Image (cartoon, rainbow, N blue to C red):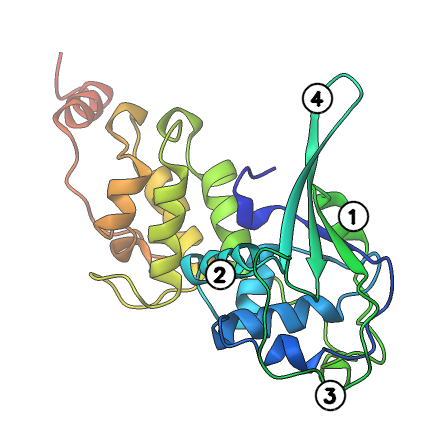
């Protein structure tokens, strides 16, 4: 299971259903338009909705930095509060996101009034937890009667093909002794390659990149000469191995000696 925050599942817990997004919330100019959109989206989630931050980033079409900046805006103005939960023994369980459609008292908003139905002042709760098994076995049902429901009625969270591809690259394909550190940096470069943002290479699919990685790893007879995954990705080391035909590579001195001994040319 990945320790990356964007891979962790998030479960929505609703105390009351939202039938509309208050106009006052959407008119709060202290929030960027992106943060207002994220807040509106969070308000559409119903009890039991499970999602991952990286899928939410894809839905909002934003990167990691922008996503956390948007969340930070909501926290700063009191629309989102984070509460840690612990067991009776003081062991950390996780965190709850409390979604409030009224800003906190220390950050009052006096902009345009809400012309819709008066809100109840109640809050919704979002629980951050590692529900990876649940997200695989259960497909969330889109909320009905809420904002965006017409668009999301038949939609399902799209799989993170790049994230899944990197997980296979890191945990299965690359030998373990070469991957003790640098996972986050490797994933960043891996994503750049698959998104067409690598400074030295053209866009490549996760499947092709992983296939090339397998060919490279199998081509190195002595594992001590295997490059680290990060410099290999930055090089980019996969390009010579994109073809199913393994490229002709010069044999090492030790390999040439071994073959000569086997053939009887060297005693």
**Which mark is first along the chain, 3 or 2?**
2
Q: Position of residue 242 (x, y in %)?
A: 33, 59
Using the numbered discs, state the Cα–Cα distance from disc 1 to disc 2 in whole angstroms: 24 Å
> Which residue is under mark 1?
134
State yes or no: discs 4 and 2 in contact (Cβ < 8 Å).
no
Among the 4 quarters of the image, the one containing residue 131: top right
Q: Position of residue 135 (x, y in %)?
A: 74, 52
Mark 3 falls on what kind of element?
loop
Mark 1 falls on what kind of element?
helix
State yes or no: discs 1 and 2 in contact (Cβ < 8 Å).
no
Among the 4 quarters of the image, the one containing residue 94: top right
> Which residue is under mark 2?
67
Q: Nearer the viewer, residue 106 or 162?
A: 106
> Which residue is under mark 4?
91
> Which residue is under mark 3?
115
Q: Kindly identify the residue that appears in the image at 34 percent across and 60 percent down.
A: 193
Which label lies toward us, 3 or 1? 3
């Amino acid at each position: 299971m990945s320790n990356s925050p964007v891979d962790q599942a998030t479960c929505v817990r609703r105390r009351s259903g939202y039938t509309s997004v208050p106009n006052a919330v959407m008119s709060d100019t202290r929030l960027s338009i992106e943060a207002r959109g994220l807040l509106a989206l969070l308000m559409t989630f119903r009890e039991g909705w499970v999602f991952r931050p990286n899928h939410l980033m894809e839905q909002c079409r934003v990167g990691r930095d922008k996503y956390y900046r948007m969340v930070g805006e909501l926290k700063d103005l009191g629309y989102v509060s984070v509460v840690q939960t612990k067991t009776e023994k003081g062991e950390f369980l996780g965190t709850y996101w409390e979604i409030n459609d009224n800003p906190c008292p220390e950050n009052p908003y006096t902009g345009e009034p809400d012309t819709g139905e008066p809100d109840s002042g109640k809050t919704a709760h979002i629980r951050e937890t590692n529900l990876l098994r649940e997200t695989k076995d259960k497909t969330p049902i889109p909320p009905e009667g809420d904002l965006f429901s017409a668009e999301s009625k038949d939609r399902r969270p799209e799989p993170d093909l790049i994230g899944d591809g990197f997980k296979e690259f890191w945990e299965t394909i690359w030998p373990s002794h070469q991957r003790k550190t640098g996972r986050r940096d490797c994933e960043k470069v891996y994503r750049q390659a698959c998104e067409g943002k690598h400074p030295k290479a053209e866009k490549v699919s996760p499947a092709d990149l992983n296939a090339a990685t397998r060919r490279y790893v199998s081509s190195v007879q002595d594992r001590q000469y295997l490059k680290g995954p990060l410099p290999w990705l930055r090089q980019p080391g996969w390009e010579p191995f994109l073809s199913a035909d393994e490229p002709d590579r010069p044999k090492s001195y030790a390999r040439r000696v071994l073959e000569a001994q086997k053939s009887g040319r060297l005693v």
